[in-house]
């Protein structure tokens, strides 16, 4: 049995380790990562799944982007499930939780770069993503979209760009002060 809950700040290290295990170091070089770096996930749309022992078993996040000018959307990813839990339907449960929450929060569309046969069961397709492109190399056949509101991706064309809240960054003075306090 796994519980799916909103992600907590205490899970950062465990989430990064899970992503490295499931997706490898090359995940950091992907175009989707360019849309996420330096940003916070969309409010209330980052989820963690915990196994029976409480350890992190899966994760999924959604990010605010524009699907071309005037087309707000969410970018889904990464979705990762620990190998021990992959046969339990946890990836599907995380997807349904994330999409239901996005719909409940009034978002109109979700886009992702992923395996079309896997994501088609949730309603994703390339039908309305042909006029969109990523900030870097990507496989056009893997750029998929899902309208949570009918017509949300009609006419979507252009560069997919980050629009979410920028992650807080400490100032240089704060970093130096932190290092000084640790070495004292």
Image (cartoon, grey):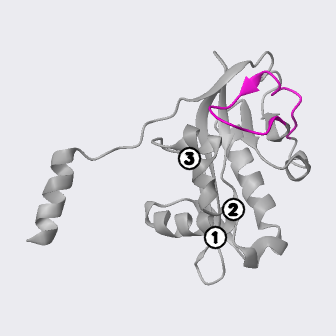
Residue at screen point 55% across, 42% down: 36
Range of magenta residues: 124-140
Instruction: Find residue 78 and report its horizontal and vertical position in percent.
Output: 66, 53
Count of picture labels: 3
**What is the CA distance from the residue labelled 1 to the residue labelled 2?**
9 Å
Instruction: Find residue 151 and report its horizontal and vertical position in percent.
Output: 82, 21
Q: Residues within 10 Å of mark 3 (few under 14, many from 20)?
A: some
Q: Closer to the camera, 25 or 157? A: 25
Tags 1 and 2 in contact by the CB under 8 Å rule? Answer: yes
Q: Is residue 126 magenta?
A: yes
**What is the CA distance from the residue labelled 3 to the residue labelled 2?**
18 Å
Q: Which residue is mark 2?
A: 80
Residue at screen point 79% across, 15% down: 155
Mark 3 and mark 2 lie on one chain; the one further toward the N terminus is 3
Q: Which residue is mark 1?
A: 21
Q: Residues within 10 Å of mark 1 (few under 14, many from 20)?
A: some
Q: Closer to the camera, 9 or 182? A: 182
Q: Is residue 110 magenta?
A: no
Residue at screen point 64% across, 37% down: 105
The N terminus lies in which quarter of the figure? bottom right
């Amino acid at each position: 049995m796994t519980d799916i809950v909103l992600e907590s700040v205490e899970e950062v290290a465990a989430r990064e380790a899970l992503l490295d295990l499931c997706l490898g170091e090359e995940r950091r070089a992907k175009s989707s990562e360019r849309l996420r770096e330096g940003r916070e996930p969309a409010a209330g749309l980052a989820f963690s799944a915990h196994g029976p022992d409480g350890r992190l078993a899966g994760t999924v996040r959604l990010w605010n982007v524009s699907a071309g000018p005037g087309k707000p959307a969410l970018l889904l990813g990464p979705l990762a499930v620990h190998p021990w839990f992959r046969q339990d339907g946890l990836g599907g449960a995380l997807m349904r939780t994330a999409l239901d929450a996005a719909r409940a929060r009034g978002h109109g569309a979700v886009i992702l770069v992923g395996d079309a046969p896997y994501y088609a069961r949730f309603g994703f397709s390339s039908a309305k993503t042909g006029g969109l492109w990523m900030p870097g190399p990507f496989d056009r056949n893997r750029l998929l979209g899902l309208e949570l509101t009918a017509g949300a991706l009609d006419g979507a064309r252009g560069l997919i760009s980050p629009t979410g809240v920028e992650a807080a960054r400490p100032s240089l003075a704060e970093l130096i002060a932190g290092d000084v306090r640790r070495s004292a």
